[in-house]
Image (cartoon, helix red, strand yellow):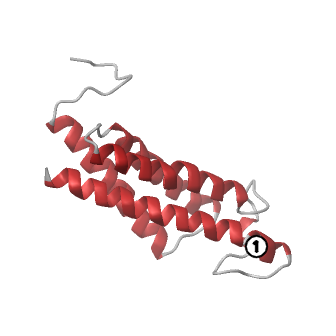
């Protein structure tokens, strides 16, 4: 199925991008503590947020969106379902929206990953419906 392969590639791109973003967040901690900027990140960006460093967002980015998408891609390669893709698409869309709100603005990467998240969500939902797979915890089960 062409859509399955497209979703597989999409998960890999999102997963690798999220792992890279998390590494950037981790590496930025020390320069930001010294009052320096690092790769476009500044400590002033965190004013008004519940965070003092990018550590917690970086951990979420690595574990949920990075490793989660890589694991979902492996499961998809093994033909073990689309539900992880659906959930991770929802997580990515929410992550980007919350990030833009907390940082009081966005950039082109936010837009790119929002589109990727919506694609992941939409393609996974289409595949689940097209293959007539049941959705766990759904109120309506056939």
Q: Quadrant of residue 127?
A: top left
Q: Is residue 133 above or below residue 47?
A: above
Question: Closest to the observer: 12 or 35?
Answer: 12
Left or right for 45, reference 111: right
Q: Quadrant of the C terminus?
A: top left
Q: Is residue 12 above or below residue 125?
A: below
Tag 1's secondary structure? helix
Image spot of residue 100 (x, y percent): 56, 63
Image point (58%, 59%), residue name: 99
Image spot of residue 18 (x, y percent): 51, 62
Mark 1, residue position = 44
Left or right for 12, reference 57: left
Image point (38%, 40%), residue name: 84
Question: Closest to the observer: 20 or 127?
Answer: 20
Image point (84%, 72%), residue name: 33
Image point (28%, 43%), residue name: 78
């Amino acid at each position: 199925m062409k859509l399955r392969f497209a979703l597989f590639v999409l998960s890999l791109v999102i997963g690798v991008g999220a792992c890279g973003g998390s590494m950037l967040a981790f590496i930025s901690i020390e320069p930001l503590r010294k009052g320096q900027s690092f790769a476009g990140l500044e400590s002033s960006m965190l004013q008004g947020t519940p965070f003092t460093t990018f550590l917690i967002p970086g951990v979420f980015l690595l574990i949920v969106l990075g490793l989660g998408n890589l694991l979902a891609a492996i499961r998809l390669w093994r033909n073990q379902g689309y539900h992880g893709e659906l959930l991770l698409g929802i997580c990515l869309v929410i992550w980007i929206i919350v990030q833009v709100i907390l940082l009081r603005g966005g950039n082109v990467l936010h837009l790119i990953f929002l589109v990727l998240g919506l694609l992941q969500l939409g393609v996974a939902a289409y595949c689940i419906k097209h293959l007539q797979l049941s959705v766990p915890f759904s109120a309506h089960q056939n």
